Image (cartoon, rainbow, N blue to C red):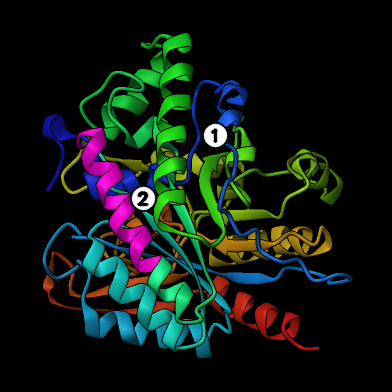
Amino acid sequence: MRQSGGGISRARFLAGAGAGVLGARVLGAGALGALGAVGGAAPAVARGRRGLAHRGVGYEVGDGESAATGWNAARMRGDLRAIRHDLHANTVSVFGTGVDRLAATASEAAERGLNVWLQPRLADVPHRDILDHLAETGRHAERMRRHGADVHLSVGAEFVLFVPGIVPGDNALERVENLLKGNFDPEKMVRRLREFIARAAKTGRSVFRGPLTYGAAQDDDVDWSLFDVVSVNYYAYHRTRAAYVKELTPYKRWGKPVAITECGSCTYAGAPKDGGMGWHEAVDYTKEPPEITGDLKRSERTQAAYLLDVFDVFESMNLHAALVYDFVTPDAPHRPEDPRHDLDMAGYSITKTLWKRPDDPAAGWHWEPKESYRALARHFERAARP
């Protein structure tokens, strides 16, 4: 279902907004420190360990834009099998909506030997509903932890975009437009964001005794004393390794494990420079069907090279985790015969979705690996060797 006024569909917007670029800097949340991290269990960091402890990919559960592209249990099981055995990931970030879907996917991942980072992302509903959804998800994470699963719980991602009332807007699309246009009160935004992060952290602590975190946008300044792991959704582009290291080093000042909970690039030449807004720059959503803008050129090699570059940085810094955004985006199909409508160019997934009939996903679809999938599989396999 598309947004009114010819805008981007909600599902496609949430996928892009998850890549998180805000037009305003969120100020520090130091006033929240009084809540502390009571009851938390910080993840162990092995002494002398080199490289990442967690290497993996994000896997979304949700309704999709149609029944054919929404979450499916059988397809999920096959996807997790591929993530574990073909991609050679040791970790999967399970995110999205619906406690039953989140729980089933997280449990299946754990049974396949994957470390699980579980993150509910209920959006555009009252605060109480969001926190209840978080609590139910956290209770399942706690049951998994007690049965021996390696599980982290994230209380959510980029609340400025997804939680009503922090900035004006009835949905995430309206909020991001108001942020970009400056139609908000910065002081109120910071105060309301601090309050909701505090409530989410408290809710997470009340039901889960394992490592707790929050998926922050790169420009957010979060009081990480509320959490056990410092996490950032990171889509920056730099020409040199030193520039990445300089930008990421401040996250270590908290003395806690640092995780890259999202990273990635679209699939066209020059996409890394467009970062988390590549999806927005690459597609004209006012047209039906949406069209790729300008003369962009598909380049799976560009996406693969960027991911290998940033993973080399993350490994060299001995960060705790790095998770690629994301595994599959069935609502943005690859159309090799029709480059003008090849929406996968504007996607961050490491697989490409092919529909049996271009305008009818219900006729059937499957994914195939991109160059980034194969490149990461080789990297993950090598990095896991003793």
Q: Is residue 131 above or below residue 261?
A: above
Q: Which of 172/377 is in front?
A: 172
Q: Which residues are magenta?
A: 125-141
Q: Position of residue 173 (x, y in %)?
A: 28, 32
Q: Is residue 66 above or below residue 13?
A: below
Q: As shown in the figure, which amino acid type bears the numbered disc 2?
A: Ala
Label number found at residue 15: 2
Residue 166 visible (yes or no): yes
Q: As shown in the figure, which amino acid type bears the numbered disc 1?
A: Leu
Residue 262 visible (yes or no): no
Q: Is residue 58 magenta?
A: no
Quadrant containing the C terminus is bottom right
Q: Residue at the spot x=69%, y=78% of the render?
A: 379
Q: Which of 25/99 is in front?
A: 99
Q: Position of residue 31 (x, y in %)?
A: 58, 22
**Label 2: element kind:** helix
**Label 1: element kind:** helix
- Dot 2 or dot 1, earlier in sequence: 2
Q: Residue at the spot x=34%, y=23% of the render?
A: 177
Report how far apart the C-alphas of labels 2 and 1 lie in the structure: 31 Å
